[in-house]
Every structure is written in structure tokens, then in C-alpha cells.
Image (cartoon, helix red, strand yellow):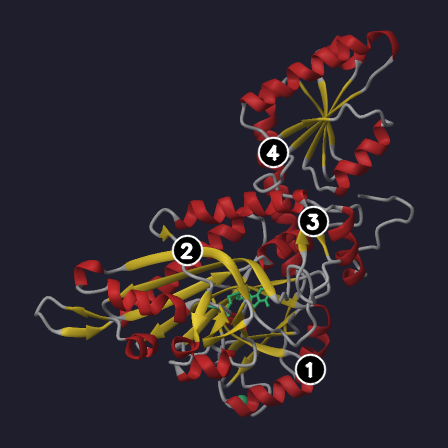
Amino acid sequence: MEDKTDALPPVSDFSAWYNEILRRAEIMDVRYPVKGLYVWYPFGFSIRKHTYNMLRSLLDADHQETIFPLLIPDHEFMKEAEHIKGFEEEVYWVTHGGLSELDVKLALRPTSETAIYPMYALWVRSHADLPLKLYQIVNTFRYETKHTRPLIRLREITSFKEAHTVHCTWDEAAGQVEEAIRLYSQFYHSLGVPILVSKRPDWDKFPGADYTIAVDTIMPDGKTLQIGTAHHLGTHFSKTFNITYEDLAGEQQLAYQTCYGISERCIASVISVHGDDTGLVLPPSVAPVQVVIIPIIIGKRKDEVLAAAETLCSELKGLGIRVELDLRDMRPGAKYYHWELHGVPLRLELGPRDIDSGTIVAVDRFKQKQQIGSAAEVPALLEEIQKAITERAEASMEGKIAICTTIEEIRTAVESGVAVASWCGERDCADRIEAETDASLLGRELRGKHAEKVNGNSCVICGREGKGALIGRSY
Ligand SMILES: Nc1ncnc2c1ncn2[C@@H]1O[C@H](COS(=O)(=O)NC(=O)[C@@H](N)CS)[C@@H](O)[C@H]1O
Ligand SMILES: [Zn+2]
């Protein structure tokens, strides 16, 4: 499925690079005949599998996984006014079963609040049932009218992890939102993807939420990608869906809720943030192939080399490493090209000379070469590569964040990344900043060290005292 006729576009031509890498590295096939729907190649699906295994292992510590129905009756979907306003232009409807028209039209879930919360109303009876913390990883459907793009803006979101929690008090729900962001930070750290956390301005929060905390990363073209969100829902939905619990005094109380979601944009971030002009660069944590062994087969010692390579391969498998032994009838160089394109973090070369000297040539994805003595050294090597990939991405993001004190500086900064500037918090100043820089006000930074550098400075628009805000172009 890969042709090497012309070279991969450089990452600096990001849009072309991104489209090409999805095909060349066999991640997604964009030729499916419905706009906004794409097909996972097995290799891409394997990246997804390892990535979502990581996410599940974090969630399963104190959430339970389940699955709710895809189809939502319109009378449930239309219950919460703000939620409807936010989604009525994006929701797909099913109106027929076979040849007969349905008496109740059914929404394809764009997100599952209105599928889940009627059931939560039946399940939640007492404070003893709380906190309730469930998640599902399902496909959801949004009739996106902006430019659709594989893994980034889909009409069928194939890997939508949505968690929905129920609590006794507003503060407990607020604590859960914090916990969700902590979990997302851990998840993205395991992918080596650096993040910016911010509280979205009120006009950008999730429909029906009290507030929204968002996780963004900066893509190679300087645009931000929102790769996770956590919402405090207050009692907006518990009022509408009558989710109440009996408290210790025997009184009925409205429950407080949160929900938080991640989609396959997490895969888009791993591909984009780490990729280089040679192809994918996959952190060992999620690489389908962590180590590839290339036997250097020379003439009469072929059998000896192959035997040594087989032994090395089974030793690595014994260490739980995802390893491929490439026995294809190709020049080593062509093999190197293939595995580098597929982002394999570590290549081991084994030839007669290496056998004689009892060493193995180890070449990491950044083409750093060294000799190792045995398979036992490989786990530590993979950890070093994980760290190197993470640090490289963190440095790259830091280089895309600029402290700004004027609109002109913001305008320049958002060409290649994110601006940090002082904002008074008023909407009309935010509108002016967005209009004059053609970028979005991402919000007040949380858990980060950038905004504090401009806290107390005067607002870049009105001059009143402001606090640091993040501004950037976004997908
Ligand atoms: N069309 C889309 N394609 C790919 N990912 C998307 C799309 N729309 C949203 N997302 C991702 O899904 C995340 C959660 O979506 S959301 O609307 O913000 N939040 C919810 O739906 C809440 N119910 C939390 S699960 C977003 O942060 C964004 O990263
Ligand atoms: Zn202002």
C-alpha cells in the first residue's frame, strides 16, 4: 500500500504531509464514499488499540466501562434547551425502519448525555449510589459543516471516549473535573504530547455546562487542536432528567454532574506532533512495532545470521516487546525506509560481524546508532527513546508560545503558534482580539506557567488590569 515514487512532503508543508502520511503509513483510507467518514487501515487501528488501552488503563482505576444505545428518541434529545441549541444543526436523524416511517424519529448520538441520563434517573436513588463514574468508547455522529479532516474533524467520530459522572455536591463535581484533567495530562504525557490547559470563555463552553476546561496541543502549522474537554454540568441535566438522590436526612436532592471526552484527535496529535520529514515517529508506549530486527544476510553465513535473529526476536517477545523480524527479500536500505516511515522507535541490525563480536547494532528513530550486547538492554533503550521523543515535542511546543503585550505581537505570534497576553475578561475585548488577530481566545491558562508572566499587565485592548489568556488559531 506504499509507493515510494515521490518523497513525503516536508512537515513544514503540514497539510500535504498529514494527508500523505495517513496513506503512506497505512493509518486511514480517506476514499470512503461518505464525506467525513474514513476507514482505519490495520496499522492505524493498531496505533488506536495501544493508545486506547493506555486510556482505559487510566480510567479503569476508578471508572466503570459500559455501552449505551446509539439511537436517541427525539423527545429525550429535545429535553435540555441549551443542549439542543448546541447540537440541533449537527445531529443526524433516523426516520425510517425499512419501508415504514418511524412514529418517533431517532437521533444518532452526537454525544450521549440524552441517551445516558434517562437511565441515570432510574439508577441513582440514594447518596450511597454516588459518585457514579461510567465511561464508554463508541462512535458518535456530528454533521460537521466546517472542513472535515481524517482524525481531526469527522462526521462519524469512531473513537469517542465519553465519561459521565454523578455527584452529591457542586464541589465534588468540580473535583471530578480537576481529576479528569489530571487523568488527561497523564494520558497525553504517556503519548509524549505536550498540552496547554485552559478554561474556555463562557461563550465557548459545552452546551448545557456550567464551565468547560479544555486540553489543547499545538500542531506543526502553529494551529491548536482541542484534544480533550471536561465539563462541569451543575444541575442543568439533573433538573431536566430528574436525576435526584435521597440524602442522609432523607431529603430528595438534585445530583451534580460532569462529563469529559476524548476522540481520535488524540491519534492525530501523536502523528502530527512527533512526525518528521521521514515519516511517523511513534513513542514506544503506543507503537504497534516497538523494535524491528533487520538481519544483514551475507552469503554463506546466512543460516547462522537468521538463527541468531530468530533467537533475538523470541528473547524480545519474552520481554513483552512488540517486535518484528523483517525477513522480506529486500535491500536493508529499503527496509530501513519502510520502518522509519511507520515510526518504529528502534531498529536492530544483526550481521556476521556482530555475531563474531557478540554485539548488536541499535539505531533509534532519530538515527542515533550504538552497539548493545543483548536483548536485555532493549527495554531501557526504549525508555530513553520515549523520553527523547517527549522532550523533543515539549521543546518544540515551548518554541511556539510567545508572550505578547500588543495586538501586533499577538497577530505575529498566532501565525506560528500561541500568544499569551493580558485580557481583562470582558467579552467585547475578547471579540476585538479575535477580530484583529483572526485567532480564537482559548481561555485562561490553568496548570501552566505561561499566563502568569503577564498577570496584572493591562488588557491589550482596553488597558484595564488583566490576567493572562491564551490566543491561537485552531482546527
Ligand atoms: N467532529 C469531531 N471530530 C473529531 N473529534 C471531535 C469532533 N468534535 C469534537 N471532537 C473531540 O471530542 C471532544 C469532546 O467533545 S465535546 O463536544 O467537547 N464534549 C462532549 O461531547 C461532552 N459530552 C464530553 S464527552 C472534543 O474536545 C474534541 O477533542
Ligand atoms: Zn479589556
Q: Position of residue 108 (x, y in %)?
A: 51, 68
Q: Is residue 348 left or right of residue 162?
A: right
Q: Which mark identifies residue 67?
A: 2
Name the outermost residue toward the front: 99
Mark 1 nearby-residue class (10 Å; few <14, some 14–19, many ≥20) = some
Q: Would you name the residue on which mark 4 appears?
A: 382
Q: Give the CA distance from mark 3 to mark 2.
A: 26 Å
Give the spatial CA distance, label 4 vs label 1. 42 Å
- Quarter of the view holding residue 167: bottom left
Q: Secondary structure at mark 3?
A: loop
Q: CA distance from mark 3 to mark 4?
A: 23 Å
Could you tell me residue 420's position as x and y percent?
Answer: 59, 73
Which residue does the numbered mark 1 point to in the structure image? 438
> Counting residues from the N terminus, which is met first, the one under dot 2 or under dot 4?
2
Amino acid type at circle 1 is: Asp
- Which of 303/433 is in front? 303
Look at the numbered discs 2 and 4 and tell me whether their residues touch, using CB distance below 8 Å: no
Type of residue at label 2?
Ile
Which is in the foreground here, disc 3 or disc 4?
3
Mark before the other along the chain sequence, 1 or 2: 2
Give the foreground label among 3 and 2.
2
Give the residue at x 61% y 42%: 46
Report if residue 463 is visible in the image: no
Q: In the rendered image, is residue 370 in sight?
A: yes
Image quadrant for the N terminus?
A: top right
Residue under the point 36% across and 47% down: 61
Mark 4: give few (<14), some (14-19) or many (20+) Cα within 10 Å: many
In terms of sequence position, does the residue under pointer 4 or pointer 1 come before the other?
4
Classify mark 1 as within 8 Å of ligand 2 or not, answering yes or no.
Answer: no
